[in-house]
Amino acid sequence: DILMTQSPSSLSASVGDRVTFTCRASQNIGNYVNWYQQRAGKAPRLLIYAASTLQSGVPSRFSGSGSGTDFTLSISSLQPEDLATYYCQQSYSAPPTFGPGTTVDIK
Amino acid sequence: QVQLQESGPGLVKPSQTLSLTCTVSGASIDNINFYWSWIRQPAGKRLEWLGRIYSSGSTNDNPSLKSRVTMSVDASKNQYSLRLSAVTAADTAVYYCAIERGSGWVDHWGQGTLVTVSS
C-alpha cells in the first residue's frame, strides 16, 4: 500500500494567517491526491481533488498544489470555521489510503 | 441533493458479523458514475477505505481485511450494504458510507455510525 504522511501533525495559527501543510506519498502518485476537512464529530468534506482542483462550494481561500510525492494544502486567510483536521488521500493505486491528518487550532 | 444514511447495530460481539446498510437519496444506485464505498475511522486514527461496490454488483475491497468484507446492492430500495465477518475490538470505529468518483475522490459522505465490538 502507498503510505501517506502529513506534517505538521498539528498547528496553531491566528485568524487571518496564511497556513500551509504538507502531505508526502511513499511513491510517485502523479496528481492523484485529494484533501478533506473533518470538523469534530462530523464526516469528512472534500476540499480539493486531483491535487489542485477546488471542489464546488469550497471557499477560494483553500488551494492545493504539488505532484509526484510532495503536496501542499494552503489556507490563504485562516477563518474560525477552519478549525478542523485535514487529511490527504491518494487515489493513484488500490487500496486508496489516507494520511494521519493535520489538526488546525485557532489561537 | 445527494444524501447517504448509515443504519445498523451499534454493538456487535467479537467473532460475529457486523452488518450496515446505506440508504441513498437524491441519486440512483444504478448511476454508473458513482462508486458506492465504505470507509471507517477508529477513534483518533486515520480514515481507512474498506471497499466499494459498483452498480453492476462487482466489488473491490481492501486486502488488509483478509476477505472478511462482503458488499451488496439492493436497487429496489436504493440501498447498499456492508458485512464484515469475524470482528474483533480492532474493528471498533465510525463507519461511513460514501460516494467515490472514478478518479478516487470521495465527494459525498454519510454522517457516520459508531460500531463498537464488545462482549
Image (cartoon, coloured by chain):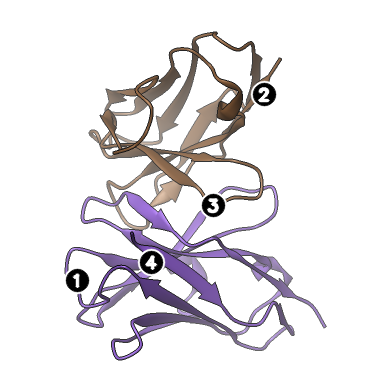
Q: Which mark is residue B31?
A: 1
Q: Which mark is residue A105?
A: 2
Q: Chain of mark 1?
A: B
Does dot 3 land on a helix, a strand or a loop? loop
Query: Taking A102 as reference, is A27 left or right?
Result: left
Q: Chain of mark 3?
A: A
Chain rendered purple: B
Residue B19, by quadrant, is: bottom right
Q: Disc 4 vs disc 1: which is toward the camera?
A: 1
Q: How many marks?
A: 4
Q: Are marks 3 and 1 on the same chain?
A: no
Chain rendered brown: A
Q: How busy is the neighbourhood of tag 4: few (under 14 within 10 Å), some, or many (20 plus)? A: many
Q: Residue at x 31, y 58 (%)?
A: B100
Q: Are marks 4 and 1 on the same chain?
A: yes
Q: Which residue is mark 4?
A: B37
Image coords of residue B79 (percent x, y): 38, 81
Can residue B62 be spotted in the picture? no
Does dot 4 land on a helix, a strand or a loop? strand
